[in-house]
Image (cartoon, rainbow, N blue to C red):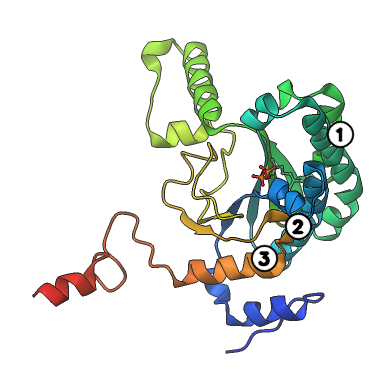
Amino acid sequence: MRHTVPAGMERKESDVYLRLDRARLPQHIAIIMDGNGRWARRRHMPRVAGHRAGVAAVRSTVETAARIGIPALTLYAFSEENWKKRPKTEVDFLMRLLCRYLKAEIRTLNGNNIRLKYIGRQHELPESVQREMAEASEATSGNTGMLLTLALNYSARSEIVDAFRSLAEAASRNGGLGHMEVDEQAISDHLYTRGLPDPDLVIRTSGEMRLSNFLLWQLAYAEIYVTQTLWPDFRGAQLLEGIEEYQKRDRRYGGLGQDGHGPHREHAEAKR
Ligand code: FPP
């Protein structure tokens, strides 16, 4: 059955959208935005020009995800390693770009009923940036549509360390460490992403095959989609292509596929 295309969708996007099964959209998509520097280098521009161009990709991706009804989108904007290992001028530029984005985007986020949150060690960011972040999330807190999470100064290993610290502190408040209950649910409940479903799909741009310390616990069963497109060239249409590819996968969660066979059905049958 053909379905209607959300208002404002471009031709290329609507072509892919019409091929999607709307009943099987991923409930949470995570994206590793990569390739800004290479995009700039190919154009003989400074690296920061790639970051600036990356904002248009963020805007388009967020709007398309919200329009088609994705409940949660998480973008890896800035890792703890980026913060520590990149030149100060580049880090300062990224901070200014983020503040500008947060200010400029509140209206569009509200127009699309999007709630904004963050994961990462926010308290280590400059205070002026923290203030801007708090204002933007406060201004969108009444929205009920998609949850947009920006990973800023984020590291999955630090998140797991923080979760264990938080578990231990909770236990010592409640009768001591002897009362500490550790199971998968308890760990999930102490991660920055508590309350969010694990991502069904993780997208990485620019062709690299790494998770780069992103949501290591939460991505345990996610489908991975890697595109050669560099982040500044990524748009809603490419997001929909990623979802289309996701819908072709047979998710097994360690069990057998929907046809009752494991991954190597053809090989097994050929040998018989
Ligand atoms: C990776 O490209 C990208 C980043 C470290 C920064 C991501 C920032 C943006 C997309 C723009 C601002 C974001 C928001 C949310 C407003 P890279 O520099 O590692 O690229 P390279 O691998 O080609 O060098």
Which mark is in front, 1 or 2? 2
Q: Is residue 240 above or below residue 131?
A: below
Where residue 55 sits in the image (x, y, percent)?
80, 51
Query: Gap between marks 1 and 2, in whole Å?
Result: 21 Å
Q: Is residue 166 above or below residue 46?
A: above
Mark identifier at residue 132 = 1
Bin the neighbour count of mark 2 within 10 Å (Cα to Cα): few under 14, some 14-19, many 20 and up. many
Residue highlighted by disc 3: 69
What residue is shown at x 82% (from left), y 54% (from top)? Answer: 109
Inspect this view and state whether residue 242 appears.
yes
- Position of 216 with respect to 7 (left or right) is left
Q: Is residue 119 above or below residue 109?
A: above
Q: Specify the quadrant that holds the N terminus.
A: bottom right
Ligand 1 is within 8 Å of the C-beta of the residue at disc 3: no
Inspect this view and state whether residue 143 appears.
no
Which mark is in front, 3 or 2? 2
- The first of marks 1 and 2 along the sequence is 2
Q: Specify the quadrant that holds the C terminus.
A: bottom left
Ligand 1 is within 8 Å of the C-beta of the residue at disc 2: yes
Where residue 134 sits in the image (x, y, percent)?
82, 33
Mark identifier at residue 57 = 2
Bin the neighbour count of mark 3 within 10 Å (Cα to Cα): few under 14, some 14-19, many 20 and up. some
The image quadrant that residue 21 belongs to is bottom right
Question: Where ligand 1 lies, by image quadrant?
Answer: top right
